[in-house]
Image (cartoon, rainbow, N blue to C red):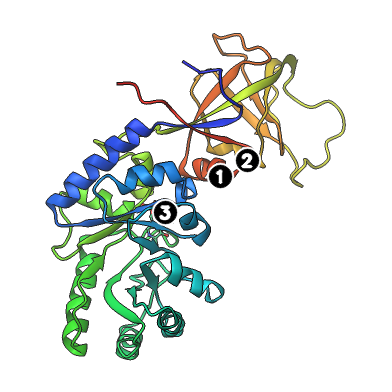
Amino acid sequence: MINEAYNFPRIEIDLQKIEENVRKIVELCDYHGIRIAAVTKLVCGHPELAAILANSGIEMLADARIENIKRYVSLDTPKMMLRLPMASQVDQVIELCDVSLVSDFEMMRLLSESALKRQTVHKVIIMIDLGDLREGIYYEKDIQVTVDQARELPGIQLIGIGTNLSCYGGVMPTQEALEKLVALKERLNTAYDLDMKVVSGGNSGTLSLLINEGTLPKGINHLRLGASVLMGIGLNDEPINSLKQNTFRLVCEVIEVKKKPSVPVGEIGLDAFGNKPVFEDKGEITRCICAIGKQDICPSDLIPCDKGIEILGASSDHLILDVTQCEMNYHIGDAIAFDLTYGGCLSLMTSEYVQKYILPIDD
Ligand SMILES: *Cc1c(COP(=O)(O)O)cnc(C)c1O
């Protein structure tokens, strides 16, 4: 049932499902001795959601953007900076976060300096690139030099190493890759007389490995989890069994319904985004326009809940649907709902024009 009493367009957030997901994940990870950083970037650091996550048995909250972390500074839960800090934001990172992921001595030097100014010690986890070619130190020799230099910095504490997989290069988290990481931590601790404890084994893709194979290498004791907690998805955005999906839904409002041809009439130039549009001639169809557009979401990230709907496309502010096959007769003012991909959810959460609506929890 669509609740008509709120603004359109809105993204409806099913907190009950998210709470269920986080409860299950915490239970499983506890059992395997894994601590969780709950990642809030998908919801842009939404303060109510962050508060719920903070109270669900996770160890820390994490985000890639300082602006998002600012939205929940008032929570006592430790906070982790997920993206390599920007040199221009080092002071803010020291002020607002307890832990950072880093990959460079120069950044650690800046963090240390800023931490000393504030008379604090900042924790860092050194990122190792195991082949996905996003952030992280790549060569073992570079890792050793960096660790050797970093341990002399008085304003930071090296608490562990970590990696990120299946994000950019699509490299899969495997038992083998993660075993390398665990072994590397041991080697570094021995070689440089350190006591690093954390091995942060990745994101929701790594959780898929734990759930599907039932195990991770012993020694992986930390994961940074966003998509799995918030949307029940893991590796390749595939649903994780035992978790709830469809935790977010877009509801938008119909502003026009008319029978029209399926192919534009007149000479075809470029569309609003500089592309030459292509059309399939299906004769006359019932076209429906909703008040949302590419400024808020890419139409390919929308999955109609009414299976009769076909998405034809969108311009900046208009979403155009073929509703010819629908059983329901749509009218101006009706609400239409869509399930979302990860990217779709992210862009709707980012759009100022979309109301963020937490569904009331029914008991
Ligand atoms: C986004 C991100 C995560 C969380 O990824 P999910 O797939 O949402 O679980 C973990 N680590 C880093 C460094 C990230 O940028």
Q: Residue at x 38, y 57 (%)?
A: 62
Nearer to the camera, 173 or 292: 292
User: For residue 296, which numbered disc appears in the image?
Assistant: 2
The reply, left or right, for residue 98 in relation to residue 178 is right
Q: Looking at the image, is 248 positioned above or below residue 213?
A: above
Q: Which residue is mark 3?
A: 74
Q: Which kind of residue does numbered mark 3 sit on?
A: Ser
Query: In the rendered image, which residue does mark 1 sit on?
Result: 347
- Where in the figure is residue 329, as x and y percent of width and height? 61, 8
Q: Secondary structure at mark 3?
A: loop
As drawn, 188 above or below 34: below
Looking at marks 2 and 3 on the same chain, the residue that comes earlier in the sequence is marked by: 3
Q: Is mark 3 within 8 Å of ligand 1?
A: no
Circle 2 SS class = loop
Q: Residues within 10 Å of mark 2 (few under 14, many from 20)?
A: many
Indicate which disc, 1 or 3, sits on the residue closer to the N terminus. Answer: 3
Q: Position of residue 306 (x, y in %)?
A: 50, 19
Which quarter of the image is occupied by the C terminus? top left
The quadrant where residue 203 appears: bottom left
Dot in front, 1 or 3: 3
Question: Residue 66 or 104: which is nearer the viewer?
Answer: 66
| Label 2–label 3 contact, CB within 8 A | no
- Residue 46, disc: none
Ligand 1 under 8 Å from disc 2 Cβ: no
